[in-house]
Image (cartoon, rainbow, N blue to C red):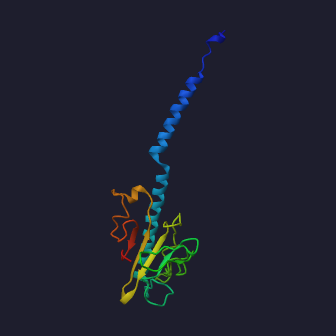
Amino acid sequence: MQNKNNIKGFTLVELLIVLTVVGTLAAAAVFIINPEELLKQTRDATRVNDLGNINRAISIFLSQSISGDLNGTANDGDCINRHYTNIQPAGYVNSFSAGRALPQIDSDRKPDGTGWIPIDFTQTLVGVSPLSVLPIDSENTGELVYRYACNMTNGVREYELNAKLESIKYTSDTQFDRDGKDGGDKADFYEIGSALNL
């Protein structure tokens, strides 16, 4: 038979020490892992992927389209001052680049020329759009939107897509820097397309 005095347990002081150590380790893990930065990196990777997909779709369109019309229903033949963003609320003011026209608001994501990119991707030799839907930035507020601009003067067909990146990984001067090393004229935007100065 056991003696009741031989039963051992943790004292209150020992429990407090263990809880303090566990709490300190958990706080250090959160600080080292930095979940907010990881979320920003994930969103930036999606932005780079989305713009890459749009860029490929425009390249396919230009190689297979009869008209090669980059500005949709605009009959002026020149889209250098036509900038499209998918931003809410309507009336948000942010030009594609300094001194250019303000963006036109269109929340439609259809790839048939009525969406935020005015290209009718269905007008290719195969008649099927390379995009099922036009992607938009997951944040879609402030500067965190996708932008499109084009130039069709004198038979030239040029375009640019850009997005603002937010993570330290993709914006600082490292091997992963996307916005500063893309060859564009805006160091704080990731730019892709056939003309990176629109």
Q: Position of residue 97 (x, y in %)?
A: 42, 75
Is residue 132 at least partly visible in the picture? Answer: no
Report the side of 13 relative to 198 (left or right). Answer: right
Q: Position of residue 155 (x, y in %)?
A: 37, 88
Q: Quadrant of the C terminus?
A: bottom left
Residue 118 drawn at (x, y percent): 50, 81
153 on left or right of 11: left
Left or right relative to 182: residue 9: right
Name the residue at 53% across, 36% down.
Answer: 23
Does residue 75 sit above or below 5 in this rendering? below
Image quarter of residue 57: bottom left
As rendered, which of 192 and 32 lies closer to the eye?
A: 32
Q: Position of residue 67 (x, y in %)?
A: 44, 88
Q: Nearer the viewer, residue 17 or 54?
A: 17
Above or below for 123 versus 43: below
Please give the count of numbered marks on the rendered protein: 0
Q: Please state, as top left, top right, bottom left or bottom right, where the N terminus lies in the image.
A: top right
Q: Is the residue 120 above or below the residue 138 in the image?
A: below
Q: Is residue 90 visible?
A: yes
